[in-house]
Image (cartoon, rainbow, N blue to C red):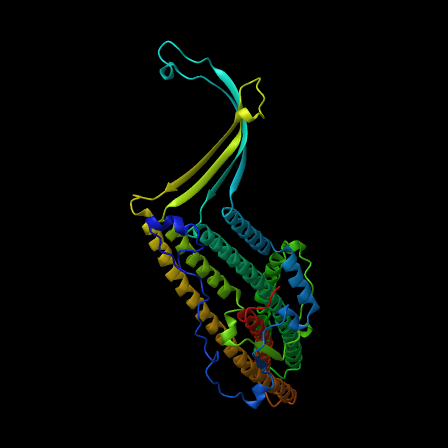
Amino acid sequence: MRCRVRIGALLGATLSACSVGPDFQRPAVKAPSAYLAPQAALEPSAAEYAQRLVLGTSPTPAWWRQFDSPALDALVARALADSHTLAAARATLAEAQELANAANGARYPQVALDAGAGRQQYGKQLFGPFFALPAFSYVTLGGSVSYTLDYLGGTRRSVEQRLALAQYQRSETQAAALALTGSVTTQAFIVASTHAQIDAVSELLVQDRDNLRLVQTAFDNGSVSKVDVLTARSQLATDTTLLPPLRQQLDAAEHALAVLIARAPADAALPEISLAGLKLPRELPVTLPSELAHRRPDILAAEAQLHAATAAVGVATANLYPQITLTATGGYEALPGEPLFSSANTAWTLISGLTQPVFDGGRLRAERRAALDELKASASRYQQVVLESFSQVADVLSALQHDAEQLAAQSNALAAAQASVELARESYRAGNSGVLEVLDAQRLSQQAQLGVVRAQAQQYLDTAQLFLALGGSDL
């Protein structure tokens, strides 16, 4: 509600409960009917690996438990309990709440207890050139009450602004918790995936050594040339180079997990996590676009900032008008030796004050215009955050569909490559083909095996990203 105040109507305005500036209203969101345009149906082979989307539902509390991994649950619990980042966010929230409480205190009369003692002398100019009162001591004891009339609602708008900023910090804390659980889950999946890739490469190296022994035996029998031996050794050496990068990736992920649970890498004592110990959720909740704005912490934070900017316009508007303050004091004043609490020594004052800005170099009006500009900027930022949230959900939904297609393709490639390796080895033993054919088949099998592991890991990662894009759940 807006109030237009004229100087001649100030007395009547003091009795009203209006607040200048615009009232906040939750912004309307132009939500699409769906996150994605209609997609082509998956091939039957890919449909086997696809997850079913359940529209109109939201992630359950503790969404990471959908992966059915006690090790992952333990890591997330440790992170939520010990994370320094989350502790800082919670402390910032507490600070914002106390600042709101402090702002609310200005709505009430301010009462103070005053006490003092002093010595004083009046000069001759008060009583003539030949006479002056002697110096004297005194003591005082009393109280004071002051109150600024909030007839324009400027103080109420200030409290509203602080409460909105506290809500912003609350949403930021929820976003920090969501990001923390997402980071722990992501790093845990990277650890599990890297272990699986290391196992696949290690198995490949075992096969390379078997091939080298096979070729060396054939060379000793005179059935192959030295070139075949060198080729087998070269393949073993080349595949050995795959391990160091994977081990470094594993170390980096484990170190990141240690930091997320507020531990040094040497003291983390991480539980063992493997892809085999994870369960991929077959059904995934998908919040309707119209409800997404009420769930995601970043959208709620942008909404709170918009609310604070709306209240700031009211504060800046109220500052343009006169400020009326009432002050009352009462107590006792006495000279030494006199009874302090005597009716003859009582003293009191009652003062009203009005301050009207006359000239400030345009500062107050410029501040109001700046508040209006910030309001417009906050509204645009809110709409942009909402739009980006729709895009993030759409990206993840597309990725999940492609993950199913990729996993199906990699699984088919692995089956074909493994069959090709067996045929190549049988052909080599029968003398119908050379070692190069065996090595080529082995290389294709190795690539397919790693491809399956990476496709599985990506499906886990994108599933977690969907939970995050939908705003997770209240913690």
Taking the image as shown, residue 251 lies to the left or right of residue 131, namely: right
Q: Nearer the viewer, residue 423 or 268?
A: 268
Q: Return the x and y of residue 16 as percentages of the image width and height.
A: 43, 54
Taking the image as shown, residue 107 lies to the left or right of residue 474, namely: left
- Tally of numbered discs: 0
The answer to whether residue 202 shows anywhere in this view is: no
Q: Is residue 297 above or below residue 13?
A: below
x 33%, y 55%: residue? 369
x 39%, y 48%: residue? 11
Using the rendered view, name the quadrant where residue 424 is placed: bottom right
Q: Quadrant of the C terminus?
A: bottom right
The answer to whether residue 90 shows anywhere in this view is: yes
Q: Return the x and y of residue 209 as percentages of the image width and height.
A: 65, 75
Q: Nearer the viewer, residue 349 or 24?
A: 349
Taking the image as shown, residue 131 lies to the left or right of residue 90, namely: left
Q: Return the x and y of residue 10 as percentages of the image width and height.
A: 37, 49
x 44%, y 46%: residue? 149
Q: Is residue 64 above or below residue 223?
A: above
Q: Quadrant of the N terminus?
A: bottom left
Q: Return the x and y of residue 353 as percentages of the image width and height.
A: 40, 39
Q: Nearer the viewer, residue 179 or 280?
A: 179
Q: Is residue 153 above or below residue 137?
A: below
